[in-house]
Every structure is written in C-alpha cells, then in structure tokens.
Image (tube, rainbow, N blue to C red):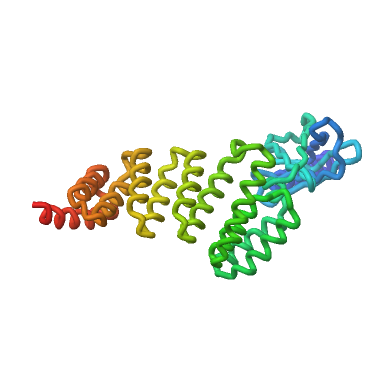
Amino acid sequence: MKRRFLILFALILLFNSYDIFSQAGMGRGRVFGKVLDEEGKPVSDVLIVAESLTERGTVLKGISDKKGDWAIAGFGTGPWRITASKEGYMPSSIELRVSEFRNPPITFTLKKLKGGPSALSADKSAVEMLEKAENAVKEERYDDALAIYNQLIEKFPSVFQILLNVGYVQMKKGELDSALNSFQEVLNRLRERDGDFSKEPETAFKAFTAIGEVWIKKDNFEKARESFEEALKISPKDEALAYSVGEIYFTNQKVDEAIKYFELAANIKPDWWKPYSKLGYCYLNKGDFKKSLEYFKKSLEVDPNSPEAGTIKAVIAELEKMTK
C-alpha cells in the first residue's frame, strides 16, 4: 500500500512538473541541424536563437561547431521561430511546430553579405547611427548629421547610397555645389557598378530628382528640366513626380514649364483632381480666364468633394462673372 502511494505521489509530481514546463514554453524537446554557406561548406560560431511563438520571452540558444552542427534542448511542444545569424552573413529564420519527442534536422544556408545597403541594414550599430542622423536632420543639426553619415561611409564604403542623405543635408545647408556632387557621385557609382540604372532604378530616380531640385535652386531651369526628364524616363508613370516638378516650376514663376508637367500628371492619372486645379491656377496666372475656368471645372468634375472644392467653386464663380 505504501509502495503504491509513493508511485502515485511520484507520478503526480512528474505530471505537475511537466505542466509547469509546458506553461513556460519549456520541455524536453530537442532540435538539431547544420549551418552551411552558399557553397555547402560548414559555418562555425553561428548563433542559433529559438523563440517560442506562444510563450513570450521564452528563448533558447545554441552555437554551431566547426562542422556547422548545432543542437538545442529544452523545447516545449508548440510553434517556435528559430534564427541563425553571424556577422558578415544574412540571417536566416524558420518557423515550425516543435515536438517534445522527435524533430527532423534543420539546415540553415547563410548567404555572405557582399556590401551594399543589406550589409548596413544587418549591422545594428549602423542602423542606430542612421536613426541618430535622421533625428539630427529633424532638429536642424546638419553638421552633426553629416558627421554621422561620413562615419557610415567610412565604415561601409560600398554603400554609396548614403551619399543621397549627404546631398539632401548639404542642400538644406545651402551648399548646392556639394549637394550636386554628392547626387552625381551616386549616379556615377551606379554606372560603374551596373553599366546603367536598370538594377537599382529607385536610387537613380531619387538622384536625378534631387539634381533637378538643386538646379532649380541655382536658377538653371534648363539643367533642371534635363534632370527631371531623366527621372521620368526611369519612372514614366509617376504622376506624383510630374506634379511635384510642376509645383517647383510654378513656385519659381516658370508657368509654361509648370503647365507641361501638370498636364503630364493629369495624363498619367486622369482621375486625380489636383493637376487640373493647378492648371487652372497656371492659366489664371497667364490671364487666360477661359482655359482657367475649364480646368477648375474639370477638377470639380473629377472630385466634387476634394479638400479644395469650396475654394475652387468660389474661383469659378468669380471667373464666370469675368468671362460673361
């Protein structure tokens, strides 16, 4: 009788301890595997981190050995995310349901970072530096921002895209020639690396647009037009760019140039009220009241409830009096 009681007591303890482990996401499960590079060679000293997806804060860790082998014990049954990471490589993750009994081996294949933005984004300290630089720009501490960007360029010489940030800050400081050089260097590096802009069109688009803005500030509208046209070649369906370029010209009292880009924006996106409204103001500026009225009415036709609808209606009313 006493023996049965002891056995029963032991089983109760066992089941209770099992429940405690399960509730904490812990258990007796074991997961193992291998880490290889793209050539199939083992990668040592890779940090393997397992995170429970049901029990927040439950984390298990391991390290791969010289053969690339790794193993972690202590898993509870349930969904887990396992991540393999090592400096100089892109991290790799997998989500799976782990059993406390038997689990298949997991092989991670890590890709070496070959420079470029991915190398920077994988570096935690570099990301923090970028955030500090962005905050410095917001607070108009431009010299501090430039100092941080230059540190990043020194640390990641292949990440020439940082020069876009440098150029924007230089432009804010009024250092237009320096900004122009920074943006142009981005285009030069893209050409040197790829031969054209097809592999990284977004970066080239930003550089050409920024160069156009610099030329506007330097009152060289012909050079600005050339740069904006290059940007539109890369992204010919970008109505926002066409509209923005029109705004730049209009603000600088280059009404005829502004009209071309507002018309382009309207052609790209015919159901957008804004370019029609701006065309109305352009022709109003030129003294062509009939055409101005036409475009203002078109703007209302496209969107009678736009944020500027009330103002446009008032302008239409005045123009109708003037054209009678």
Residue 18 seen: no
The tally of labels here is 0
Image location of residue 180, percent across then percent down: 58, 56
Image location of residue 114, percent across then percent down: 75, 42
Q: Residue at x 64, y 54 (%)?
A: 162
Residue 127 seen: yes
In which quarter of the view is residue 4 placed?
Answer: top right
Q: Residue at x 29, y 47 (%)?
A: 276
Depth check: give the residue in front, 180 or 139: 180
Depth check: give the residue in front, 305 or 6: 305
- Tell me if 53 is positioned left or right of 293 in this view: right
In which quarter of the view is residue 314 placed?
Answer: bottom left
Image location of residue 236, percent across then percent down: 45, 38
- Tell me if 136 is positioned left or right of 290 in this view: right
Residue 121 drawn above or below residue 133: above
Residue 29 drawn above or below residue 150: above
Image location of residue 179, percent across then percent down: 58, 59
Tell which residue pokes out farthest to the left in this image.
324
Residue 298 drawn above or below residue 215: above
In which quarter of the view is residue 92 placed?
Answer: top right
**Quadrant of the image for the N terminus?**
top right
Q: Residue at x 59, y 70 (%)?
A: 141
Depth check: give the residue in front, 68 or 175: 175
